[in-house]
């Protein structure tokens, strides 16, 4: 198992934000984190990334606790794409992607040939090669998000954590971005809002409700009419597509 | 890499030439070769052949003053570049954030109330004042929601508070002679520069430069915030504590020698960024060089423009800095 959380909890101000959640991401898989706003998706991702220390429970990477690795060593293994990246600094796309090399570099030395190669290859993989010298802030929302993914790839991680990467993107860019993530040779955990996107792209999903994992398994096992009613408080029909993956159709509330 | 070396060479040469030429400007007519002769004379070379008075003008007055201007410019600009990256605010600088103002208060308390003794007491008072002011402004910004704009507002509040404390101390306990001395800290002036100030400030600047430059990569990583930096393997808590401590110390030492000179730390990092780009590995040394050259010329302007009257250097930097502040502010909104 590449990344695993065992009964992790995280409390803030006496309130449990994440409550005894289990999660397992086998190597190469794409795991979806689902749940309404405030259900603990972002906090759980931060715990998985080692950015928040769980109050109880443990996160392991290759069966060794996350906390046993140094910060730098961890950053060369696991990369994070945050939901809302902003900066005031006039960085080019190349500069942004090159940030992914920070854990590989030391002191005042100039970037090595390996660093430059990693930046170029990450840009090529995300289709950003033509934009390398453009100011990151002038990119469209989808391109910015792709640049952040390219930065994460430049870290050369084996695990990739993404917090609602499709937010504010149009449907074309949402599909394109998730297809890109699934095609990467990494284990990824993705927090998602859209149940149908999760059903389409994830190998397994975890459904969070008020900090607890109320269901986990394949999209077909988890995305049932009952679970959606319980967690989101909406009624829906769930059909099974020709590929065996579920599709969710919401019903219009009365009134 | 070759370009980096060439850039550094041009920058350092420009600074050396600036210092040498700035010293020749003023009421007594001196040439660059006179300056050179005096310096080699004092460093154990052949006698300069200049009169004692002209020798003293170079060695005791203008050289320490010009060097202190260079060191203060470099240090304040460096502090600005580090704070802007660390606090993710293009308007951050020791003066705007009230650190300079806190250092002034500390120095004035020592001066007027006679706590401690000599320049060590003054420096210590300034350092404690800087630390207290910095901690207060950061705490206030955090209480107010922690956004980058709140930080500037907290800085304004801190500056006002410490200016008020300074005024109170001066009015309640200083005599006329001390009041004149206090004005020095409030406006920023290099007119009292001596070799002791130059050596102390250079030593602290050297330490500050080495520490900050060694953390250049970490500063790059702060571009998208503290969590993003942590996810790139930066020990955020340690880096932040070290850099805030270094900038407070450097500001305090510079303020205790030359008073609160504003806007150097705000404006010069932006100029340097336009020259060498946002990578801190290049930006920090470039900022220090540009800041040094800038303040050498600003001080030369201040002491010669209305000769024999002298305009305090802090007044000149504010006159230049406020329009530049407006430009940075405008670019950010757009």
Image: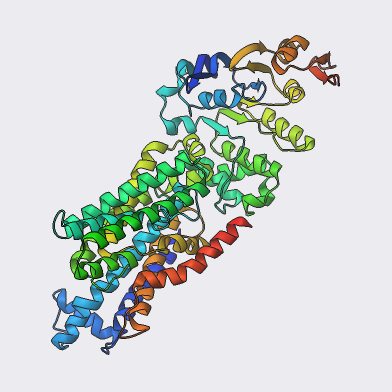
Rendered residue at 40%/50% (across/down)? A108
Picture quarter with the N terminus of chain A? top right
Residue A122 visible, this angle: yes
Q: Is residue B37 above or below residue A2?
A: below
Task: Tell which of A154 and B109 is nearer to you.
Answer: B109
Q: Left of A102 or right of it: where is A215?
A: right
Residue B10 visible, this angle: no
Q: Is residue B143 above or below residue B255?
A: above
Residue A53 figure quarter: top left
Picture quarter with the C terminus of chain A? top right
Residue B82 at x, y = what percent?
Answer: 41, 52
Q: Is residue A73 above or below residue A119?
A: above
Q: Left of A237 or right of it: where is A22?
A: left
Rendered residue at 29%/68% (across/down)? B183
Residue A151 at x, y = what percent?
Answer: 58, 40
Rendered residue at 21%/70% (across/down)? B176
Residue B177 at x, y = what percent?
Answer: 20, 70
Residue B151 at x, y = what percent?
Answer: 47, 48
Q: Is residue B65 above or below residue B222?
A: below
Q: Left of B56 or right of it: where is A176?
A: right
């Amino acid at each position: 198992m590449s990344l695993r959380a065992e009964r992790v909890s995280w409390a803030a101000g006496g309130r449990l934000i994440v409550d005894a959640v289990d999660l397992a991401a086998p190597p190469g898989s794409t795991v979806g984190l689902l749940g309404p706003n405030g259900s603990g998706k972002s906090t759980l991702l931060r715990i998985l990334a080692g950015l928040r220390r769980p109050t109880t429970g443990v996160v392991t990477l290759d069966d060794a606790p996350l906390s046993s690795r140094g910060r730098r060593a961890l950053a060369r293994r696991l990369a994070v794409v945050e939901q809302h990246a902003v900066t005031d600094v006039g960085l080019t796309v190349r500069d942004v992607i090159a940030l992914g090399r920070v854990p590989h570099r030391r002191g005042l030395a100039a970037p090595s040939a390996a660093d430059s190669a990693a930046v170029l290859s990450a840009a090529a993989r995300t289709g950003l090669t033509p934009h390398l010298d453009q100011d990151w802030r002038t990119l469209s929302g989808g391109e910015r998000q792709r640049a952040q993914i390219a930065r994460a790839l430049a870290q050369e991680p084996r695990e990739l954590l993404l917090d609602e990467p499709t937010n504010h993107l149009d449907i074309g860019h949402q599909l394109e971005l998730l297809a890109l993530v699934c095609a990467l040779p990494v284990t990824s955990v993705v927090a998602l809002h859209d149940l149908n996107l999760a059903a389409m792209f994830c190998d397994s999903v975890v459904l969070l409700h008020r900090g607890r994992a109320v269901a986990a398994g394949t999209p077909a096992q988890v995305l049932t009419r009952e679970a959606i009613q319980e967690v989101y408080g909406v009624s829906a029909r769930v059909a099974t597509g020709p590929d065996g993956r579920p599709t969710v159709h919401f019903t219009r509330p009365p009134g | 890499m070759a370009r980096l070396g060439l850039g550094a060479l041009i920058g350092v040469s420009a600074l050396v030439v600036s210092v040498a030429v700035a010293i020749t400007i003023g009421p007594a007519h001196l040439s660059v070769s006179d300056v050179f002769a005096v310096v080699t004379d004092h460093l154990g070379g052949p006698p300069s052949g200049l009169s004692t008075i002209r020798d003293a003008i170079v060695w005791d007055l203008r050289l320490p003053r010009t060097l202190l201007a260079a060191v203060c410019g470099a240090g304040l600009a460096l502090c600005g570049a580090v704070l802007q990256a660390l606090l993710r605010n293009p308007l951050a600088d020791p003066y705007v954030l009230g650190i300079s103002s806190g250092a002034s208060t500390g120095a004035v308390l020592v001066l007027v109330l006679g706590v401690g003794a000599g320049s060590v007491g003054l420096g210590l008072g300034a350092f404690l004042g800087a630390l207290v002011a910095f901690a207060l402004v950061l705490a206030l910004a955090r209480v107010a929601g922690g956004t980058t704009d709140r930080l500037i507002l907290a800085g304004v509040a801190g500056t006002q508070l410490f200016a008020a404390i300074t005024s109170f101390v001066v009015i309640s306990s200083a005599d006329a002679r001390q009041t004149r001395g206090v004005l020095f800290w409030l406006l920023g002036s290099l007119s009292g520069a001596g070799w002791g100030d130059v050596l102390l400030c250079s030593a602290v600047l050297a330490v500050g430069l080495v520490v900050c430059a060694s953390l250049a990569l970490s500063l790059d990583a702060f571009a998208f915030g503290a969590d993003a930096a942590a996810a790139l393997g930066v020990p955020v808590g340690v880096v932040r504590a070290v850099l805030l401590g270094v900038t407070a110390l450097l500001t305090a030492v510079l303020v205790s020698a030359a008073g609160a000179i504003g806007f150097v730390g705000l404006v010069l990092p932006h100029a340097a960024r336009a020259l060498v780009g946002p990578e801190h590995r290049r930006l920090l040394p470039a900022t220090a060089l540009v800041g040094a050259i800038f303040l050498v010329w600003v001080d030369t302007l201040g002491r010669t423009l209305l000769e024999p009257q002298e305009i305090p250097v802090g007044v000149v930097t504010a006159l230049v800095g406020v329009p530049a502040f407006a430009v940075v502010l405008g670019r950010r909104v757009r």
